[in-house]
Amino acid sequence: MAQVLEWMVEGSEGESERLATLHEYGILDTEAEESFDAITRLAALICEVPIALISLVDEKRQWFKSQVGLEVRETPRDQAFCAHTIERESLMEVMDASRDPRFTDNPLVIGEPHIRFYAGVPLTAANDCRLGTLCVIDNTPRQLDDRQRQALEELACLVTSLLEINAEKRVAQANHAMLDSLLEALPEGVVASNASGELSLFNLQARTWHASVPSYSTPEKWVNQFNLCEADGETPLAEERIPLKRAWNGEWVRNQEICIKTVDQAPRHVICNGQVFHSPKGVRAGAVVAMHDITEKRQIDRTLREERRRLELILQGTQAGTWEWNVQTGVTCLNERWAEIVGYSLEELDPTTVETWISLAHPEDIALALLMCKRHISGELPAYDIQYRMKHKNGQWVWVHDRGRLVEWDTKGKPLVMAGTHMDITARKKAEQESAEVRTHLQAVVDAATEVAIIATDLEGRITLFNSGAEGLLGYFAEEVVGHFTVLDFHHDDEISQRAAELSRALDEPIEGFAALTVNPSRGISERRDWTYVCHDGSHRRIHLVVSAIHDVVGNITGYLGVAIDRSQLQSMEEALQISESQFRGAFETARQGMALVSLEGNFLEVNRALCDMLDYSREELLTTDFPTLTHPDDLAADLASVAQLIDGDIANYQLSKRYITSSGNTIWAQLSVSLVRDSAGEPQYFVAQIQDITEQRKLEQLKREFVAVVSHELRTPLTSIKGALDLINAGAVGVAPPAMAEMLSLAQRNTQRLGQLVNDLLDWEKLDADKMAFDMQRHLLRPLLEEAVAINLGYAAQYDVQLELVGERQASIEIDSLRFGQVMSNLLSNAIKFSSRGGLVQVCYRVEDDHVWIDVIDQGHGIPSEFHSKVFQHFAQAKADDTRPQSGTGLGLAITKQYIEQMSGSIGFRSMADQGTTFWLLLPLASDDPAHAAQAMCDQGERK
Amino acid sequence: MANNIENTAAPFAQSPPEQDLAAPITATFQRVLHVEDDESIIAITRVALETLGGLSVLSCSYGEQAIEQAPAYAPDLLLLDVMMPDMDGPTTLIELSKVLDVSRRPVVFMTAKTEEADHQRYFDLNASAVIVKPFDPVGLAARLGTIWEDFQKQENNP
């Protein structure tokens, strides 16, 4: 006993598991059950005892699930024989408890029911926990036989099985109840059919939705029992389309939308999911379908669609474009109208990013637009609202008005999406601009009209506006008169009365006072006549006054406007205009050269007599034609090109030698000079052309050139003979001449050489002038060219006792015509030699600078007189000969030299100071592939050898 | 240009005129047919070639004369002025080619024209050289000698 108590207090793992199992079985304190009672009765009968019990031992007691021969349902655990039984694995038998030390003092032995005999078999659960016993008791000592013991053990097994079945049943019942309540509580509708396809389950939600509880009805009846439709809410659902039927047929029903219509309920849209289910043996046991109500979602969707459509309609109505800009990714979403405003379709702009917008916005506006965005995003501005320009596909600028705001932030609270509208406000801007312009113009007119008096009045004649012209005319200040005077204060009473009387007669109604000025204007007839104004100083002035009515927007007259001009001033202005007009006309008409005003389209607007004579057309004929028609076809392109440049503002005027075709078909040459007249806003208005007939001049030039060619050519033949003869004589071919004669012959020979050079120069000049000289440009090394030039002139230098020196080291190559370059160098060298003093030095120095080469020809002569500097390169020019030594030369040399150098893309010049010699310099570009470029680059890098 | 008369000029030697069209070509440079309308130039050329150069010169004042006399003369070289009245130098050459095998003799034009386009026209007529007036009479014989030698080299090594 003490052992048991101790064990009870301490407990153990085994005991707590046993107790847990006992409680799981859920058998304690349950009603008596016949199946258990039958076993106890059988046990008592077999063992021939009065008492049999099924005892279950919990923490503090033993409780009897079934008892025979005993009234009490439980006894304390410390008195229980069974507490001992469950300590062992098999049957415990006590033959006489009164003699057993474990039970001698047990109240159940000492008192009722006076236990003497006890035999119990433990009830062992599947997990080996012994939950209690099946026991038999007698009040007389005795002993079971083997057959009885065996029966008792079999019965105990039976009890255990019963307990287990009972427990499982209880769990199943609980689960079922839970499932039932779950199904009932589900917001989804759940329906199921059984193995034969009949409706077997209809949960609360389903019942509610269908408003009926049809049980075990078959699918063919469902079509009539329920009002089911397809998702469109109208087409009746065919039997084969009913989700439960489909599921039962083995289909995998997923998200099938149907509409359930039930009396007193709004049509209900549900999404159905379902499938067949099978018994453990794989036989179809039924089907289940769950329905989810999406009516509300449908409703929201529809509302959203509706709203969206309405919004689109509104946007369409307002002609607004829309945009969404993801400020983090730059991706933008634009609508068709947005693209349309700038002349594109959305496909053309795809993919649209913020760059699309930036590229289309006006460069001057984009910075401000981005700043506004930034200020809105930073929270500085409540909204992004800006008007700016964008480039339309057709190249024009359109004004747009953007409004938008941030509409989305990311999870970190950073700005994510901006959205807004995009309106084309070009028309409005234009109107605004126009009205602003008109206002500005009007204000400017009113302000600037110091020569014109502008006076506005209300309906009674009280002055409301008095401009500076009026101040000047009448001698009053605006502040004095506005609101204080009426216009009648300026008029001569007699004139007003007289005019009023006239009007009264004419209109057959009484007119007087202010009405004399306004009756006509108020009827839409302008009132223009001369009046006399009485000025502040009492003097009188004749004025010409125009009165008109001022209307408001709806056409009501709100006042009158008078514009007055001083008569005397007007007359003098008109005269001045007439004079200047006639002066211009006179100058234009009497000009000796042709003059014309030509429209931008090329039509003659005005022509003078000289032009008519030149082209042999009448004035009327010219005014109906245009200049391209009269221009020689070969010259038209050049003319039109210049015209285009003029209109574009690239040039201010142009001159052109061109041919015109006269009425008789003759070609005449003319020197044309054209300028463009623009208005104050800079818009081209018309051309002024001066046309000079240069046909004769050109003929003369041509003749001159031909003459030069012929003459120089014809000179060669006799020259050949003279020079030949002299050369032969001096060579001794015809005998030896006496010394005096030989000297004369030598003189003659030298002069013949000069004559030959002169003829050659003349021929070269003619060729250059007629642009007939071809240049054979080739790449040449510079130094050999210079060496050759020096060598050729060594003999000539020797004649003058002059030294030649070539200075310069670097390799360089130039692109020139070597023959012409040789002529240039010879020309410069012979000049330098000629002008040097005896024993002098002429240097040829060259150096490379950047991509050019400088060549200096330096002499130590007397220098070029400063008064001659400007004429050095003119043809037929030569400085006055030095007194001490005769100079030879044609006077064409330097002119030709300059032409040659310029034709070879070079330039030429000189420096000269009296008595310090002269330096002629040439500047020629290096050949494009010149190695000196590379050499120079190496020097620059400090790799000089 | 080298001015070495001794090396290039052949000694003066008058050979008998040939009558047939294909007059034999001599192995030495001796006879020059000169067609020139200007008497002064003729005179100068004669002195230059005969006196200084030791050559033989047949001077003709106009084209027809040259056509008439050339076959008999059998010149080693033709020196033709370009601009002449009635028949100019190029025409004279074309006419000469009918009576003389001009392809086997160097032809030299003499002209006051300095334009290369004109010169090219003469070269197109198979001229060997063009001498521009005023020319150097002292070096003329030597120059013609060089032209003749160059022509012979080309003939032998076409």
Image: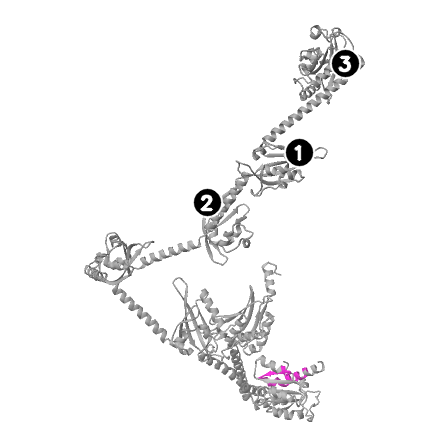
Which residue corresponds to mark 3?
Answer: A46
Q: Position of residue A134 (x, y in %)?
A: 73, 15
Q: Which residues are magenta?
A: B124-150
Taking depth in this image into account, of A192 and A523 the one nearest to the observer is A192
Question: Element under label 2?
Answer: loop
Q: Is residue A410 above or below residue B110?
A: above
Look at the image and tell me in which quarter the C terminus of chain B lies. bottom right
Sequence-earlier tag: 3 or 1:
3
Q: Is residue B98 above or below residue A96?
A: below
Does residue A562 appear in this view? no
Q: Are marks 1 and 2 on the same chain?
A: yes
Please identify, in this view, whether the residue under mark 1 or under mark 2 is nearer the observer. Answer: 1
In space, the residues marked 1 and 2 are separated at their CA atoms by 64 Å
Q: Position of residue A299 (x, y in %)?
A: 53, 40
- Structural crowding at the residue carrying mark 2, measured as other residues with C-alpha within 10 Å and reported as few (<14), some (14–19) or many (≥20): some
Look at the image and tell me in which quarter the N terminus of chain B lies. bottom right
Taking depth in this image into account, of A402 and A722 the one nearest to the observer is A402
**What residue type is disc 1 on?**
Asn
**What residue type is disc 3 on?**
Ile
Chain letter of the residue carrying label 2: A
Return the mark for residue A383. 2
Chain letter of the residue carrying label 1: A
Taking depth in this image into account, of A746 and A123 the one nearest to the observer is A123
Q: Are marks 1 and 2 in contact (CB under 8 Å)?
A: no
Whether the magenta-drawn stretch holds residue B43 is answered as no
Return the mark for residue A194. 1
Q: Is residue A563 left or right of residue A755?
A: left
Whether the magenta-drawn stretch holds residue B135 is answered as yes
- Structural crowding at the residue carrying mark 1, measured as other residues with C-alpha within 10 Å and reported as few (<14), some (14–19) or many (≥20): some
